[in-house]
């Protein structure tokens, strides 16, 4: 506490809910800490969400608010939302009075809107980081008074018509970019380096449709000598898989994979959702992929994210409704087609901007100097 009180300049980071919001925020915060070790970095997150555990593991202080988004399917569940907003506003008043931040940066999640809205009300410069090809309503509203909007897709300019839009690309966490040999990855997972390996990730929270599909094709993967690293999410237990009795040691299933560098390095092919963070990592690592956009997202932004890559032969785009009819054939074909893997790899790496981190740091530093 005494150390916190001695820090003169603070930056507030707000990110929550999913790894796609949290990990880019952490990547920027860690780089900022390297460049400015005397700078205070405070995270504001949401209670009972994954940031409550992940942020402290990276040695950043975090204050947790009690927030949730608008429930469009069951309006009765929104009854307490105004009260939570008022309570959060009062807590933010205390936070801003104490820390007097020079800039506030939002990376997405329900908690981001009230944090940046309060910062704008207090005249604190705000930076909005929009990762998707189409912005959410919250970011459209925040952009009207934002000091800068950092985006990855030029299509954002069709929705946010301000001069403060900066096309910088999406951010990738530093740890997955550290070089690693496939031999090291194979030893880490205790897998056979000479066998083909699939990495299946349904986002940081898991995806039931992908999990059910993977579960059903496990015998086919084993029959074809294909290894699997599978992030299931907390809500899905491999014990419930109907083919559990047929699983052997070539199948690794974990609720959450912290060791993503090892997982990506081992993977010949990736099966994933179309979250902006995931696509940015696949581009940075040039991984051939089959992408299955989630249909349960605002503005269908995952499909639009993926379509931009599919139009350039950078991924194979598979509609969730076609998983059962076409998924197995597409996966087996890709894992055995080295020339197609090479083509996808060469094309997707063109979507990685290695200067994205430097660009957003430069923006932040502008407001720190002021």
Image (cartoon, rainbow, N blue to C red):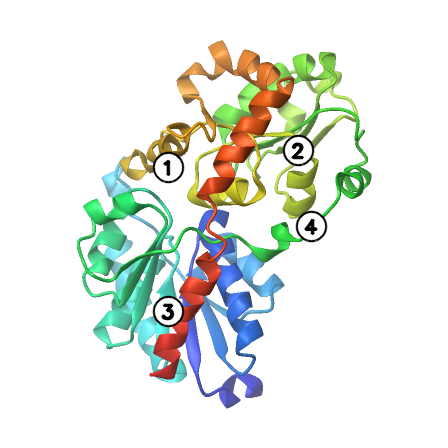
**Residue 137, image x, y percentages:** 23, 48
Mark pair 4, 3: CA separation: 28 Å
Picture quadrant of residue 174:
bottom right
According to the picture, the residue beneath numbered tag 1 turns out to be 305
State the SS at label 4.
Answer: loop
Binning the other alpha carbons within 10 Å of mark 1 as few (below 14), some (14 to 19) or many (20 upward) gives many
Considering only order in the chain, which callout, 1 or 4, is on the residue closer to the N terminus?
4
Q: Is residue 108 left or right of residue 171?
A: left
**Residue 65, image x, y percentages:** 40, 63
Mark pair 2, 3: CA separation: 35 Å
Considering only order in the chain, which callout, 3 or 4, is on the residue closer to the N terminus?
4
According to the picture, the residue beneath numbered tag 4 turns out to be 179
| Pointers 1 and 2 in contact (C-beta within 8 Å) | no
State the SS at label 3.
Answer: helix
Residue 279 visible, this orientation: no
**Residue 316, image x, y percentages:** 47, 24
| Pointers 4 and 1 in contact (C-beta within 8 Å) | no
Q: Mark 1, mark 3: which one is toward the viewer?
A: 3
Judge whether 148 appears above or below 206 on screen.
Answer: below
User: How many dots with numbers?
Assistant: 4
According to the picture, the residue beneath numbered tag 2 turns out to be 267
- State the residue in front, 221 or 112: 221
**Residue 198, image x, y percentages:** 64, 28
The residue under the point 76% across, 24% down is 195
């Amino acid at each position: 506490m005494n150390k916190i009180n001695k820090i003169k300049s603070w930056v507030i980071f707000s990110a929550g809910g999913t790894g796609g919001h949290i990990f880019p925020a952490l990547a920027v915060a860690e780089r900022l800490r390297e460049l400015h070790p005397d700078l205070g970095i405070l995270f504001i997150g949401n209670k009972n969400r994954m940031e409550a555990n992940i942020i402290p593991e990276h040695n950043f202080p975090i204050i947790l608010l009690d927030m949730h988004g608008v429930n469009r399917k069951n309006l009765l569940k929104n009854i307490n939302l105004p009260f939570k907003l008022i309570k959060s506003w009062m807590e933010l008043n205390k936070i801003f009075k104490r820390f007097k931040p020079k800039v506030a940066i939002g990376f997405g999640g329900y908690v981001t809107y009230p944090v940046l809205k309060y910062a704008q009300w207090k005249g604190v410069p705000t930076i909005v980081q929009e990762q998707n090809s189409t912005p959410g309503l919250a970011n459209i509203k925040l952009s009207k008074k934002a000091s800068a909007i950092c985006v990855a897709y030029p299509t954002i300019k069709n929705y946010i018509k301000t001069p403060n839009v900066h096309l910088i690309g999406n951010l990738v966490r530093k740890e997955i970019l550290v070089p690693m040999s496939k031999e090291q990855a194979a030893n880490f997972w205790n897998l056979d380096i000479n066998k083909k390996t699939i990495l299946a990730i349904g986002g940081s929270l898991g995806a039931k449709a992908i999990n059910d599909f993977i579960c059903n094709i496990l015998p086919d993967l084993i029959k074809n000598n294909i290894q699997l690293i599978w992030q299931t999410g907390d809500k899905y237990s491999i014990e419930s898989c109907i083919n559990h009795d047929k699983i052997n040691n070539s199948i690794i299933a974990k609720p959450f994979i912290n060791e993503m560098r090892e997982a990506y390095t081992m993977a010949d092919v990736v099966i994933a959702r179309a979250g902006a963070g995931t696509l940015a990592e696949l581009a940075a690592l040039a991984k051939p992929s089959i992408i299955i956009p989630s249909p349960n997202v605002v503005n269908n932004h995952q499909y639009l994210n993926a379509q931009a890559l599919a139009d350039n032969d950078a991924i194979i785009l598979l509609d969730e409704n076609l998983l059962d009819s076409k998924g197995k054939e597409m996966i087996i074909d890709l894992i055995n087609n080295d020339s197609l893997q090479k083509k996808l790899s060469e094309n997707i790496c063109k979507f990685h901007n290695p200067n994205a981190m430097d660009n957003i740091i430069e923006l932040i530093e502008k407001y720190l100097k002021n």
